[in-house]
Structure formats: structure tokens, C-alpha cells
Image (tube, grey):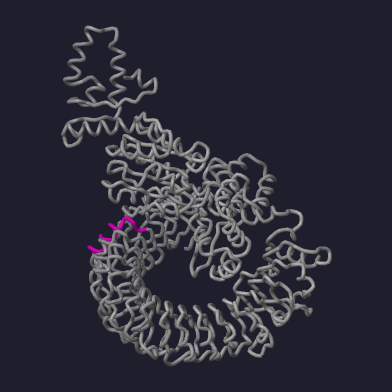
Amino acid sequence: MTECIKSGHIVLPIFYHVEPTHVRKQEGSFGEIFSHLSRKYKEDVEKWKEALREVGSIKGWEPAKTADGHEGKLVEQVVIKVLSELKKAFLLVVPEQLVGIENAVKAILRLLDDNANDTQIIGIHGMGGIGKTTLAKVVYNNLLGQFQYHSFIADIRESSRRNSIPYLQQQLIADMKEEDRVFHMDGGIRILESRFKHKKVLILLDDVDDINQITALVGKFDWFAMGSKIIITTRSRFVLEKVGVKNEYELKEIAEDESLILFSRHAFLKDSPPSEFDSLSRAIVSTTGGLPLALEVIGSSLCGRKRKIWEETLKELQKVPHERVREKLMISYNALNYNEKQIFLDIACFFIGEDLRYASYMWDACGYGPWMGIETLSFMSLIKIGDHGKVQMHDQLRDLGREIVQQEDYEVPMNRSRLWMHDEAVEVLERHKEIQKVRVRLLCLDKDWTKEDFFLFPSELKREFTTEQFQTLPNLRFLAVRGAKLIGDSRNLLYDLRWLMWRGRPAFVATNFCLEKLVILDLSRSDISERWEGWSHLKMLKHLKVLDLRGCNCLNVTPDLSAFPNLEIFQLKACRNLKQIHPSIGAAKGLIFLDLQGCDELQELPQEMGKLGNLEELDATGCKSLRGEIHIVGLFSLKILRLNLTGVFGFHGTFDKFSCLEKLELDNCKMLQSLPELPASLTVLKVTGQYCTLPRLSHLIHLKALTVRGCPLLEFMPELPSGLLELAIIRCSNLKELPNLSSLEFLSKFLLNSCGELMEIKGLEGLKSLARLTIAQCSKLSNLDGIEHLQSLTWLLLLSNGPIFNDDQVSGLEKLKNLEQLNIQNCQSLARLDVSQLTRLEELVLCRCHNLLEIKGIERLKKLKKLDISGCPSIDIALDLSCFDSLRYVGVDERLNLPDVQGVTIERCQV
């Protein structure tokens, strides 16, 4: 056995009815027999003794002490161990420098463990270079020991093109220990479907980009025995949805601090950069946008290079992605059709952070089929749709798109399809006499057109353009200009223009451009008024979908909208002096969205708005002068109604026919007196009103978020719908009783603030999904019975001057092992706290807890980033900061022992 160890074998000893120490020292009954044998074989005794000492020191099994003494169970353990050791030869190769992958691995394993007896399928999707294959390999390696049959089919997208699908089927069949030959795809399907019903398998299908690849290799996931697990990686979520994969995991960019660690491991072979390269490293890391492939490639390429090379690399990366990263990203771009590519390039060059509804009108007018294209880009992780429909794109993809456009002609900008750099755009117009025609379709003459500062607009003209200059731009479909004057009298310019954004001083535009095809007109932050002569010239805009007048502070009355029958979006946000909405708004029957946010002087909404039967969203947040009753009769398509920070006190009409209403926000409506019966379709409700009580809520089966703020007449909260996800009750000073919360099993966020009469919370133990709990300034709340059952809790904030804890509830805190942030302030009933089991804590705040004596187990909090125990005069603790690798903030009292420690970076230390 020891000779085998020397040649690389593994020894797993079983000490069958013998003590390991007896083997090691040749004692007891084992020693007696050994002594008897040693007389016969004198020459080999010393070698035997040395071997027994070595083998006896190896950890093994003792039947009497293993598996409850049952030898059958011991045999199972031995077999599992042997198989796992043997299968290490089949582990997939993964990079040694893995960072930020642990949580993703745990999340996927949890999904795969939900029902271990069924065949489990999970799809991992995300943009190219994000680390899907690496993540899938790590998960595969974690599961490998559980399976006798396993297969990893790599790079299916490329392999299926190069070697055909039957080749991949043949590989899968061979991995399943079968010898059948595959000559065509249908034959492979028949073999796989018929031969493997009895085999429990682990399969990883890597980089799938076509539905047929999945159906040819694993069918409908019922070709294998129950308990099988199938992992699929793909750039396109559409592929997963098409074949019915229910468990999906989107892999996202890694965080900034983890990005720096991964980059440093490749660039410096350690976890952090040396001080002389710190700022350069951080600047380079910021260009990668948390993309692991970019961090690895760039870090490796800079390892051992001189500072000058680093500086040149940074300049280049700020323009375009690294070549190897670009090649990887181009795979996704090349998979798009022509229309999808145009949408992708438009977004990369112009529309990141913009409302997709705007751009979609332009793309639709150009025949690009926008919503299908947007869906494709989203499914392929080339874009993300954020809050309020605004589109986001990874920085590396943005730079890729801009590089593709620049490649159209590096030397001559006028030969490119899109110009987003202000200086290049101006140069093209200034050279108009030298050229006959330019290719440009999208042009930006505004240095900062994406910045939404509606409180300011240019007070002086920045530049003058002539109509003659624009004659060289016949293909233009998008034009963005700020604070410029247009001179000349030609009226046949820009015939194909779909989107005109002329901010600041647009009074010269309408009479000089041919705008018949225009669908979006943005005159925001300008000095136009209702008396502007250009309104008469705009009556030709029969196709207009969007009219944006945000920040037009000279506007007192909205323009006549009767000429715009197809208008769908009307933006009036931050028109500070707007006093009246013109009655013609009733003629805009196609209107879907009306934005009146921050129109301080607007006093009423005209009754003619009742004709807007298609209106889906009305936002009058911050219309401080808006008072009285709001006429809602006729607005039956409303989905979102926001009247926050207004003086409304009720509604003229009822909500009984509002079957579409999802969000009703009446936050900080201090004059609100009553609410009518609410529709069952509601998902979000926010209410503030000093005279207001709540109507029945239990029938709102779709309600997900409820905020009740500043309602002093409210003494009893009505029964709550069981589907609530978020609940906030704030400044309800006379609230005496909450309903039993045990039925709110899906509630994830609960905020209770300044409810001074509330004495208890019933049913806290039933909140099985609660992740964030905040209780502040509830001075009569005397206990938190059931808090120990909140095992999903990651955030707990308790701010109270009252005796909120008893000893049992303090011990209950110690059981909340998923807590990441624990913040307890002004709690005088807290004396001792054991945090030794709260190993996930990143933030621990125990401020002004005057009777706190002890924090036990604090040295075990290896992930701690913030520690604040200031204002705790009774505590006695010496802090050894060397055990806190992640600590970035410390708040302590001056008398505490806070030693100087090397290797720990404290960004802020408050004493």
C-alpha cells in the first residue's frame, strides 16, 4: 500500500475491528499477532513497521464508529468515496483564478435540488464573455460524484456547424458507455430516445444557439431516468423558453471590487495591485464593465509589462474593446438579421439610457419591426430593459457597436451611417460645400443630449446653422441639436426625418424643415410659449406619435392638439408655469401617456380628458396647485395613476369599471379624505391623507406593494391580501392594531415607522419569505415574538427607544443565519448578543445601546465590511482588526482598543 502511495495512488484504509493507534504502534491484539509474524519474517519487520505507521496515520473508516455501526451503510460510504475519487479524473478544467462565482453556484445547485427525484433542467444565459461556461463547469464538477453516466458537449454552436449534429449525438452516446453508430440526426434521436430510459445522467450542453441542437441531444428531457440533471448554456434566453426550460439563471457582471481582484490575479498574480499601479488598474477595470473575459484577457496581456504599455492600453480600451473580447462579442452581433443590427447600432451610438418607446416609433416608421428586434436583443443579452422602459447596454457592447460604425470609414466621418461625436458632426456640416452627399442617417449636434436637466435651458444661442448645410443630408432620420439657430428659407429639407430633437431655441425649425414623416418631436427645455408661430406650421404632422415639451417654462397653456390624431405620448414634465391644459386634448384620442410631473401652477385637469379612452398612464406627481376632486370618468384604460404630492381630496367618479388599473399612487396627498372602492386589478397602492381611512383591501388579490403614510385617523389596518410582496406603514400615529400577518407568506419587505401606539405584531413567524425588516420609532412595541422563524431575513433594522427585546427574542436573532445587515440602535433592553452563527454579516451596527455588555463571536464575521458600536458605554471589547479582511468602516468609542493593523484598508474610521 505504501509503495502504491509513492507511485501516486490513493489509499483509503478501513480499520476493521482494530484501533488505528494499535496499527500505528503495533499494540493490543493487533500487536500480538504482528509480534508472532515478525519472528518468522525478521528481514521485513522494520519495513512493515514503517508502513503500518504511515497507513495508520491516514484518516479512514472504523466500522464500530462509522454509520451508526451498520456495516451495510459503511459499504455505501466507501463506494461513494471511491467513485468520487475515481471521477476526479473526469472533472472539467476550470480556471484557477475564480472570483465572485460562489453565490451563482449555490443558487444553481439550489434550483437543481428543488425536486431531486425529477429530471432537472437549468438554463444559464447571458452575454458573451460573461462566464457561462465556467459557471456551468463548476456546477457540473460539484454534481459529478452523484452520477455514473455523464457527458460534457462543448461549444455546440461551433461544433454543430463544423461537425454536424450527428457527430455530437455520437459523442453523447459514447459518453453513456454505448457503442451504437449514428449516421444521421433522426437515427441518433431514435437511439437516444430508446436506449437510455434506465440511465440517470448528468449532461452539460455548452453554448447552444439553436432549438434543434437541444431536441436532437436531449429531446423533451424525458429520454433519461428520473433524477437526471441537464445543464444548458446559451446566449439566447429565447432558446430556453422555446424548449420549455423552466429554471433559468441569468449570469450578470461581477461587482467592482471582485473585478479588481480577478484582474489583479491575472496582471500581478495576487489579489490587489501594487500601490504604483493602483489607479491605473482601477481605470482599466472600469472599462471592462465587470466582464470576466475582458478582465482575464487584459490582465494577462499586461502582466509584467512596463507602465507606458499600461497607459497606452488604457487609452485604447477607452475607445474600443480588446481584440479577443471583441471577437467573442461579434459572435452575437453576427447572429442578428439586418433590422436587428440597425437597432443594435442605433442603441449603441445614441439611445443607451433612453426610453425605448421613443426609439421604437422611429424604428417602426423605418420598417425595422422594433418590438421583435428589441425582444431578440434582450433575449440574447445584448441589451437590458431597465426601469421605466429605459434601455441599458454593457459598456463593452456599446464600444463594439460604435467600433462597427467607425469601421465603415475610419478616415472620413461623413461616410459613416451614424455620427454621435459632436465635433465630427459639426465638421460634416461645415464642409457642406466640398461634398455632394453624405451617408449619415443619425446625427447628433448636441454635446450632452442625454442629460435630463429640465430646470435649465440655454439662455443664449451657441451656434448658427443654415438650411444650405442640411441639404447634404437627404438620408437623415434622427437629428439632435441644442441651443442653435437655423437660418434660411428652404422648406424641402430632411424629407425622411423621423425624429427631431431641437432643444433650447427651436423657434426657427418648423418653417424650414419638411416634417411630414416626423413621428417624434422634442422641443424640450426651450423658450416657446402658446403664442409661438411655429404651432401653425406643425399641423402637417399627421403621423406624430410623441410631443415632448418638458421644461418649457414659458408655456402657460398647452398647444391645440386637434391636429395630432395619432399622438400617443405627451410630455409636459417640469413646465413650471403651465396653468391650463387646452380643451383640445380630448381630440387626441390615441393618447396613451400624459406626463404632468412638476407642473407647479396647474390647478385642474379638464373634463375633456374623459374622452381619452386609451389613456394608460397619467402622472401628475408634484403638481402642488392641483386640488379638489379629480374627474376619472371615462379613463377606463388607465393602468397607472400617480397623484403624489398634490392637493387632491377625492375623486369624481368610481373605480368600479377600471379593470386595468395596476398602480394608484396618492403618496403625500395630505388633503386626501376618502378612497372609493378599489379595483381588484391593483398591484401597487400608495396612500397619504390626514383625514383618510382605508377602504376594504382583502379583495385586491393582485396587490403586491402597499404604502400607507401619514394617516393619523387610521387606528385599525384592514385585512391585507395574501399576495403582498412589500408593506410600508409610516407615521400612522394612532394605529393601534395590525391584522394577523401570518397569511403574508410571500412578503419580502416590511417597513414599520413612527407608529407610536402599536404594541404588538401578530403572526410575524408566518413571514417565511421576508428578506428586509425595518422597525423604527415604535416606542410601545414591546416584543418581536416569532422573529427567530424569519430564516429568509438578510436585512434587519431596529431603531427604538422602547423595550423591544426580551431574552428569548435576543436569542432568536442568533438563529438568523442569512443576515447580511444587522442594525440595532437605541435599544436599551439589549445586553448580550451572540453573532458567532451570523457568518454572512457584512454590516453590524449596534449604536447607542447603552446596556450592551458583550458581543460574542464577532471574530468569526469574515465578510464584515462595516462595524459601528459607538455610543455603547457598557461594552468591553478589544478589536483585532486583522481578522476582518473586508472591513471598510469602523465606528467605535475612543476608549476602545483599536490597534494599528497592516493589510487592512479602512476607508473611514469614526471615533
User: In the rendered structure, does residue 219 fall within the stretch colored magenta?
Assistant: no
In the image, the segment drawn in magenta is 807-819
Q: Which residue is drawn at 55% across and 89% down?
A: 584
In depth, the one of 438 and 672 nearer the eye is: 438
- Using the rendered view, name the quadrant where residue 93 is placed: top left
Residue 826 in percent (x, y) is at 35, 70
Residue 792 in percent (x, y) is at 31, 59
Farthest residue, direction right: 434
The N terminus sits in image quarter: top left
Residue 140 in percent (x, y) is at 39, 41
- Using the rendered view, name the quadrant where residue 831 is placed: bottom left
Instruction: Please tell me how many numbered marks the rendered image carries.
Output: 0
In depth, the one of 550 and 827 nearer the eye is: 550
The answer to whether 60 appears left or right of 550 in the picture is left
Placement of 411 over or under 625, stated as above or below: above
The answer to whether 451 appears left or right of 13 in the picture is right
